[in-house]
Image (cartoon, rainbow, N blue to C red):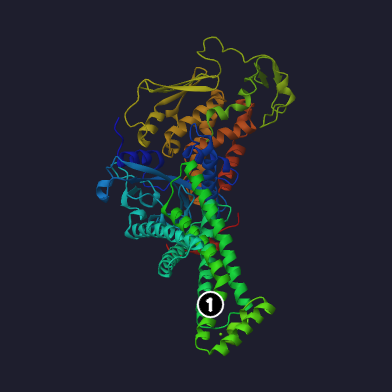
Amino acid sequence: MSRKSIREVQQSFAESLGFGNETIWDLLSNEQSKILKKKIRILIPDPEKNDKQCAVFARIRQTIFDAVWEQRKYTNRQSLTSIFYVLVATDETNEDDAINSKKWSCHPVFRARRCVSDINGRSVDCCLIYVDENGRVYQNWESYVTSNQLPEGIMVTPPRGVYNLTLRGDVILQSMPTPASSTESKVLGALDITLAVGGLGAAAVPIAGLAFTVAAPVMLVAGAVGLAAAGYSTARAGAQLVDRSQHEQSINVTDRTARGQWLSVVAGAVGLGAAGATSAVTVATDAGREVGAIAQLTVNSMNISSIMISATGLTSGVIDLILKHQDGDDISTMDALQLSASLFLFTHSVYNFKLASTIINDTANNRIGSYRESLSNQQRRTIDKVVKETIRTKGVSTDIIRNVNEMPSRQQFNRDFNRNGIRPSFAANGQGVELNDQVFTNTAELRIQDNIEPDILRQVTNPMPESFEGSAASGNNICLVGNNGGRVFTGSSGMTELTANYAPENTRNYADGVRILRLSSLVINNVAIELSQFGDDIFTRIINAESFENALLMLADNLNDNVMQFVLNLTETFMHIFWDELNDFLKFYIPAESVLYRIGTHILDNYRYLTIDHLQLFTREILVAVSDYFTSLNPNNFPGLLTKCKVCNHFYNICDL
């Protein structure tokens, strides 16, 4: 089976994630973080048959979650995000040809709302926040395009991360080289490799110098190359820490990558400082100037500090490389450069420590020797006596130099009763509830919540009752049937299977999916509810036909035909009365499937066991409660608090989380 082209894959994503020319957002309230975590887990599942990497993947998911959830600060503590995908053509260099490439890598990116128009709250032409698969945060589209960490190649993406379609239904895409393909990136990569190799070679020379004498020119060249590698590594590590900070990545030493960069910066700064101080002492002693005890102590302390820090960096670098290899991560040229620089700084600092400890004595003796050559024999004997006496009394010859120098699945939806093996049904007289044809109760007594099992449930000992005569399956028998054969859904004990007797082409398309819904019937216990009886207020505002189907089936698993009809009527009423006002107030699109689901769950949570006659008495309360729910999700800030963005000239506000 041949692989799909980038255009075909992105077309599929656009049909699933886009909606005409609108900007689509997924809204989660402050209490719905688990939904985002589940979504990220689907994007980045644990690897199969590799338990060692599960912890690594868990950290990656947590990093992405923290970065995305943090962006609620721009949307009044509500999470307003959407996912899009960037595909990188790895076998093309031409931007026009990349869209048809069949050799590509796929990278999910979260888009979050940041700025809004001051007129209608729309985010068109405004700055958006982008969070990539590494948990890097980009403040606008330009920042993402120019500083992402995608592999070398041509990236093909919907403009600004928003899936839109042409009038013909084709996805709108743009192509551009990734930053890794730029000349600057390639030059830096070449420098990383060159100086990493040079640093490793330079590190060997000081080691040899500890064992035997190395020619001064060789030591000088090695020192120059090594110090250049160390300086470059320090600058690169510092730049990467700044980059991580700008993109809201952790720069804490507990983060493995950040820790390596901090050690590289500190080791480089101290190591280069120690090397400079040692060189200064050498120059001073060669010039015959005094180097005091405090200066000597300072130089030795710097060299000791450099030894300790560079040894820590070296050890950490080796361990990180081992862990990366075990985790299956790529080892970058920057990893090799930092390890090379740490090794050089360690060996060079050890050599410098020995040099600084002996150079004054050695230089002093050389300087004294040169003076002695210019003295008479009597003067030499006098100097020698003074030197010996100074050493005898002082122990050192220091002064001599001075003197001389996140919707649940249907299974989750039905778990309350199913996990207890209980099937509730309405009592024969319409009053109260009967559990497994055994225990009678009322709505006041029956309350099922997570981790709570009331005594009433423990009284039920009968198994779930068999289905009534004539039914094809136990529990509600649910059919969603299109007029031309359509798609048939049959339910059994809360589980629904899909059988496709006839499915028109492009059923994933928005228009076709909604058309099928309107020509369908929802059958509950042999009672058909014709969906065509409901008007445009519902069907013109469905964003995802599959989600609407799922909501219908989940609710039909738990409601009888009369209540389900009532739920659909309420949905139509809500869309007709409240939708325009809420849409203007919230400044985002509320899909019909969300309203259907919220009305149904509100009834299940609060009025589950009321008869239809009693339930209708609460019509107003239900509509107001659902309206209040959507109002509570308002992601917009008070206009008086908005700040004008210097990039897009629109407006934003940052609130406390």
Left or right relative to 497: residue 511:
left
Left or right relative to 279: residue 125:
left
Tell me residue 500's x, y (percent): 38, 22
Q: In which quarter of the image is the N terminus?
A: top left
Q: In this view, does 419 lie above or below 183?
A: above
Q: Is residue 654 above or below residue 491?
A: below
Tell me the quarter of the picture where residue 621 sits: top right
Tell me residue 157's x, y (percent): 35, 48
Q: In this view, does 427 lie above or below 634?
A: above
Disc 1: CA contacts within 10 A as few (<14), some (14-19) or many (>=20):
some
| Closer-to-camera residue (515/537) | 515
Tell me residue 583's x, y (percent): 49, 48
Residue, x 38% and y 29% (percent of image)?
516
Residue, x 50% and y 74% (percent of image)?
279
Task: Mark yes or no: residue 635 visible.
Answer: no
| Closer-to-camera residue (545/197) | 197
Task: Mark yes or no: residue 615 visible.
Answer: yes
Tell me the quarter of the picture where residue 504 sits: top left
| Closer-to-camera residue (220/2) | 220
Residue type (three-letter) at the residue carrying disc 1: Thr
Q: Which residue lies furthest to the front in this view?
A: 377
- Residue highlighted by disc 1: 363
